[in-house]
């Protein structure tokens, strides 16, 4: 298991040149007219044409060789436990494997697979803080996993949310996976969380594992979490009319997950498009789960939504980058000055029917990942999981 003890950005200057296509992650302007990016100490400092940028003094230079550059992909819904191990599938290396699928940032929806997880107030707070500390102090191959997401239980008071926020907790686990399953109690606790800057999500749909339960539209609407977690079910989706109601009657994030109902995801996307609210759509995997770990889950969702959801491929990439960054208050997810220098280099898979990256994704083919960069540091080269990319970036010798 590769890891590092301190989540520090790369020191010095990173230059990326000869980029064939820059996908910004921003719905308003998904493709940038530029072919180079410069980052200093892990932050983007310049974007533009190579002839206009200062490349001097670079500690690292990457020649994209015509490959595309996107922000690092964000998985809005994971369930970590300890390091790079998941007891749900008794599997090692799942986070590192997802990096090879272009995911550079993950958000915990609760460490609910922890064997014997405590449900009392003292215990759940202690576990959340421990998880937050562990994943902040030890990043698997640089991947930013925002962990420590407590699942709310009866007995929590406002002071507990203040304490959690003060300890660095930024996210709630899925509302409904604990003992709080009714709308009024959930709404009160979600409001306390929001007051102290804690972002929230809710389980939506049928039970995911034995012991969990149905959370329908009425509970979701009353709880008013910041994100409607796996609105396409995790795994079992609500009826279409309830999904459409949630899209129409609230303005919160609409999370589509790989481990959900694909048809329901398309229903959600279609409704959001009709409402002119595609900025609400974000992507997750809901892994590890009973169906396993999906290292290419986010890429698969992008390709599925682009090929079957009647949205341009560059728009679908925004769902997994800038949209999530904005709804989850992250400093990554956009190719923008001042943002974290988290990048994925992509190109069309070899022998795809599509002639370009975007055309191939629009046809439903997965792209090939050629390299990932987190905080200005190269973390992986040609992916061991994706189809081989046609164009590959390379590091220019110093």
Image (cartoon, rainbow, N blue to C red):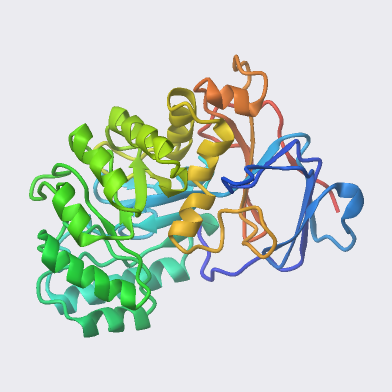
In this rendering, the answer to whether 199 lies above or below 248 is below
Q: Which residue occupies the foreground of this view, 21 or 40?
A: 21
In this rendering, the answer to whether 137 lies above or below 265 is below
Tell me the residue at 79%/48% (across/down): 36
Question: What x and y, as percent, mark residue 82?
Answer: 33, 60
For residue 225, side relative to residue 22 (left or right):
left
Tell me the residue at 13%/44% (across/down): 207
Tell me, yes or no, if residue 230 can be seen here: no
Q: Quadrant of residue 382?
A: top right
Q: Which residue occupies the foreground of this view, 161 or 350?
A: 161
For residue 172, side relative to residue 326 (left or right):
left
Question: What x and y, as percent, mark residue 371?
Answer: 64, 43
Question: What x and y, as percent, mark residue 98?
Answer: 46, 44
Q: Which residue occupies the foreground of this view, 16 or 45?
A: 45
Tell me the residue at 64%/45% (across/down): 29
Tell me, yes or no, if residue 370 can be seen here: yes
For residue 123, side relative to residue 21 (left or right):
left
Question: What x and y, as percent, mark residue 189?
Answer: 20, 71
Label count reads 0
For residue 300, side relative to residue 82 (left or right):
right
Q: What is the quadrant of the C terminus in the image?
A: bottom right
């Amino acid at each position: 298991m590769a890891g590092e003890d301190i989540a520090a950005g790369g020191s010095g200057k990173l230059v990326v040149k000869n980029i064939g296509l820059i996908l910004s992650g921003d719905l308003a302007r998904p493709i940038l007219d530029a072919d180079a990016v410069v980052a200093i100490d892990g932050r983007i400092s310049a974007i533009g044409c190579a002839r206009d940028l200062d490349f001097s003094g670079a500690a690292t230079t990457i020649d994209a060789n015509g490959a595309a550059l996107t922000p690092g992909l964000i998985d809005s819904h994971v369930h970590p436990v300890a390091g790079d191990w998941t007891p749900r599938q008794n599997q090692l290396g799942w986070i590192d494997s997802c990096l090879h699928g272009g995911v550079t940032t993950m958000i915990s929806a609760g460490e609910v697979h922890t064997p014997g997880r405590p449900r009392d107030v003292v215990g759940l707070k202690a576990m959340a803080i421990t998880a937050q500390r562990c994943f902040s102090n030890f990043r698997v191959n640089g991947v930013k996993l925002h962990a420590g997401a407590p699942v709310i239980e009866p007995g929590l008071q406002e002071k507990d949310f203040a304490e959690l926020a003060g300890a660095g907790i930024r996210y709630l686990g899925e509302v409904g996976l604990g003992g709080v399953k009714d709308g009024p109690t959930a709404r009160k606790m979600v409001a306390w969380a929001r007051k102290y800057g804690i972002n929230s999500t809710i389980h939506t749909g049928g039970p995911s594992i034995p012991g969990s339960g149905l959370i329908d539209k009425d509970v979701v609407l009353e709880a008013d979490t910041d994100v409607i977690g796996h609105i396409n079910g995790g795994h079992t989706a609500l009826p279409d009319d309830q999904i459409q109601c949630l899209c129409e009657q609230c303005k919160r994030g609409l999370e589509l997950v790989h481990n959900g109902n694909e048809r329901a995801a398309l229903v959600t996307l279609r409704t959001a498009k009709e409402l002119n609210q595609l900025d609400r759509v974000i992507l997750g995997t809901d892994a590890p789960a009973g169906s396993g770990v999906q290292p290419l889950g986010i890429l698969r969702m992008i390709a599925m939504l682009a090929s079957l959801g009647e949205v341009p491929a560059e728009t679908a990439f925004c769902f997994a980058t800038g949209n999530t960054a904005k709804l989850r208050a992250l400093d990554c997810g956009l190719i923008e000055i001042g943002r974290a220098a988290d990048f994925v280099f992509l190109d069309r898979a070899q022998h795809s029917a599509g002639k370009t990256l975007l055309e191939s994704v629009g046809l439903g083919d997965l792209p090939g990942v050629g390299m990932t960069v987190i905080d200005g540091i190269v973390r992986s080269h040609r992916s061991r999981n994706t189809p081989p990319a046609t164009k590959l970036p390379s590091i220019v010798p110093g």
